[in-house]
Image: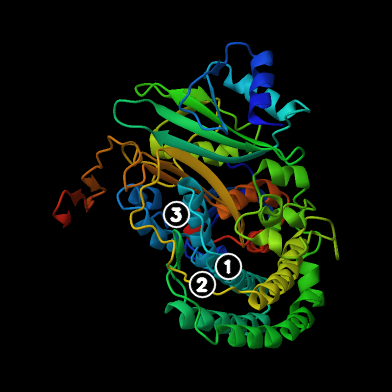
Amino acid sequence: MKIVEIKEVIMDQFPGSVIESEELSKSQVELKPDQWFEIATFMKEDPNLSFDQLECITGIDLGEEASLQTRYNFHSMEHRHKVEILISHDRKDPKVASIEKIWRIGDWFERETYDMFGIIYEGHRDLRRILCPDDWEGWPLRKDYEGQELYHGIVIPKMKEEDGWE
Amino acid sequence: MGVVKGDQMILNIGPQHPSTHGVLRLEVMTDGEIVSQIRPHLGYLHRCFEKHSENVTYEQVIPFTDRCDYLASMNSNFGYVVAMEDLMEIKIPERVEYIRVIMAELNRIASHLLALGVYGLDIGAFTPFLYMLRDRERILDMFEYTCGARLLYNYMWVGGVSHDLPKDFETICTDFLDYFEPQINEYNNLLSYNKIFVERTADVGVIPADVAISYGVSGPNLRASGVKWDVRKDEPYSIYEKFDFDTPTGTAEFGTLGDCYDRYWVRMLEIEESVKILRQALKEVPSGDVHQSLPKKIRPPKGSIYRRTESPRGDLGYYIVSDGTPIPSRVKMRSPAFTALSCLDEVSRGWMISDVIAILGSLDIVLGEIDR
């Protein structure tokens, strides 16, 4: 199926869930976060879509003024088609439904995005940091991230403009 | 991990333990000798690859990709440059494509040799490891001869490669392949058909196809479960369409489909396929200038791309977001070993501790790539 057709199927099933935007590339579909869990379940179980493979979850920070985004890349082993889903989050309170129960790899991918961006995946059964230590402060990949100065007494080197490394 | 009851015990494996293939720590809940849950702890080798990438230019990201999957650096480079070239819509010379495929396939053989050798070592067979490393060394010598580095190459650049092939590379490589092909038989006699090895791996740690897909397991691990999926064939990139090769899948040679032995065996068959591709590619390398289409300034248009390629461990994906400046806005690496490791908990339940080592080894993880 082509992206346009996939988009139509989702629109028919969940009216008002797709956000139209001209900035998106050909392979992207932007959704509202409200019904995400139901849409995701539908995408996996509908025989015409049957997206059985969750390739990747990427968190993105578009800048200090803009919102955070989660981008999901799906692929169907049966139909050999793919789609990229975008969901935007409020910067102050980033929240979206977890899809960890639908695709098991969502578990670690969501933990990684949570670790780096602080996006809360509601319904995730074990949302902990995965790459950073459990007691790390802040969300490292956000554009407005300021690293902590000490970690258990260890000084954390910072890059200063023009001076190079401390 | 919950409450520990009665006969249960929590065993800590790693992070300094040879059979975890790097700095991985496993918290294993056991009931007697039987494993009831595993909780992997990652991040001991986290070097902030993605954060670094947001502070350097696009070409400076390439050496970082080397260090992610340090056993198959060529393939890591390859994935990144393929994604970048798609984003920038650069057309690259035919000669460069051939050189890249040759390097990637050589590195695939080297990586698989190490994976199989070390797997034997995990199970208790020392000799095959030495034989395989001996032959891997010859591949590394060829890389050194071409670009000066044994392990971390920074060889593939956006739009080209750093060095052209040496004049006599074709002869050296063909000589190596002639020497190497009969060696595969030797490995098989030493390890593949060894009764002890088969007993330790056949029927152990079966991953059914649907579980594998749900966990995002890819590459040889997925093919061992009987799914015929190879990015080189199914989503062709570079010039892989031109070559004639098969996609070996698990055959349940000695046990059940998708067991540890199948994952081992698929890698062995894949080495033969790589040799096939190499022989075809070496014959047809066209002439040309490898630096001809290197862009003066790498400044991709605004936009984003997700592209995956087949690394020795599976689907290696790069998500690159560009905001129109010479510095990437976001680089995300979807590493195949990360997804493969995530299924360890489910697959290992009900097996013994010694089998967990066999299962972990068969997944062929590289911690540099998992922790990034």
The residue tagged 3 is B372
The amino acid beneath tag 2 is: Gly
Q: Are marks 1 and 2 on the same chain?
A: yes
Asked if residue A87 can be seen in this view, the reply is: yes
- The Cα atoms of the two marked residues, 1 and 2, are separated by 20 Å
Q: Quadrant of residue A85?
A: top right
The residue tagged 2 is B288
Q: Secondary structure at mark 2?
A: loop
Q: Quadrant of residue B1?
A: top right
Mark 2 neighbour class, 10 Å CA radius: few under 14, some 14 to 19, many 20 or more: few
Chain of the residue on which disc 2 is drawn: B
The residue tagged 1 is B104
Residue that appears at 53% across and 56% down? B79
Q: Is residue B241 left or right of residue B29?
A: right
The location of residue B285, given as percent across then percent down, is: 61, 74
The location of residue A64, given as percent across then percent down, is: 29, 30
Q: Are marks 2 and 3 on the same chain?
A: yes
Outermost residue toward the left in this view? A163
Mark 1 neighbour class, 10 Å CA radius: few under 14, some 14 to 19, many 20 or more: many
Q: Nearer the viewer, mark 3 or mark 1?
A: 1
Q: Nearer the viewer, mark 1 or mark 2?
A: 2
Q: Is residue A70 above or below residue B181?
A: above
Q: Secondary structure at mark 3?
A: loop
The amino acid beneath tag 3 is: Arg
Residue closer to the observer: B330 or A148: B330
